[in-house]
Amino acid sequence: MSNKTILITGASHGIGAATAEIFAQAGYNVVLNYHRNVAGSEQIAEACRKHGVEAICIQADMSQEQEVSRLKDEVLEKFGKLDVLVNNAAFTDEPDFNEATGESILHALSQNFLTAALAIRAFVPDSMNSESSVLTVSSMYGLEHAGSPGLPIYSASKAALINFSETLAQLYAPTIRFNAVAPGYTKTPAWDDVPADRQQACLDSTMLKEWVTAEEIAKTLLFLAQTPHINAETIVVDSGFMKRNNQ
């Protein structure tokens, strides 16, 4: 059995699923957290096991403290410690802001920010190994001057994750590193229902006019996990969108 373990939240599809397989290829045991998609999670776990590592699936709503606590207990019972935590759980289905209620705003914030905060609070620092790593999937919309007018709550929550990661890097140095990745337009199942003309417009707004792939984001996360002197940083992987649109 591998001596390193990674927990990925929201791991049943998209970036989370790609991250699970990339880390499995690198020899990490994998804990896949999912909320509802048990079939997708099990399918990814089976793919991970083909690389000779252990992979388990744990259902939990990461915005609920009791469920996060249960997940922590299951992870520690199985593997003892955690080397890498990837905060990937996310929610983009927010209402038009003019129609948003306090409840809907809090729900979006809880799914995008609280999920990461509770996961970090559960495992850091006592349940993680020395020289371990916390990685957070933010968004290019969370960068300075980059929020999306169509997704203001999502943008705010992703900006909060970047600030949170940088701040905790100071709090927990030198034993635990905190870094983030800010993906651009990444081809995942979330785009399946988006009209083709809208998809093309998004691609045309980038320098490279191509999708970022989930595997690229996963490889960036692996790079951050395995590079011991990168800390309190956010790596942007966006096909040149930000530099083209914020000159």
Image (spheres, grey):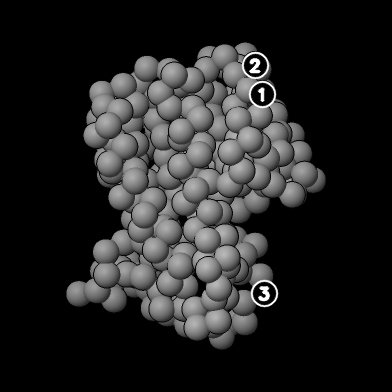
The residue under label 1 is: 74
- The residue type indicated by label 1 comes to Glu
State which tag comes first along the sequence, 3 or 1: 1
Residue 203 in view (yes/no): no
- The residue type indicated by label 2 comes to Glu
Could you tell me which secondary element the residue under label 3 belongs to? loop
Could you tell me which secondary element the residue under label 2 belongs to? helix
Quadrant of the image occupied by residue 155: bottom left
Quadrant of the snapshot with the N terminus: top right
The image shows residue 164 at horizontal and vertical percentages of 34, 46
The residue under label 3 is: 193
The image shows residue 134 at horizontal and vertical percentages of 41, 34
The image shows residue 162 at horizontal and vertical percentages of 34, 51
Q: Callout 3: 10 Å neighbours few (<14), some, many (20+)?
A: few
Report the residue that reaches farthest toward the front.
Answer: 102
Question: In the rendering, which numbered label is found on residue 77?
Answer: 2
Residue at 48% over, 44% down: 116
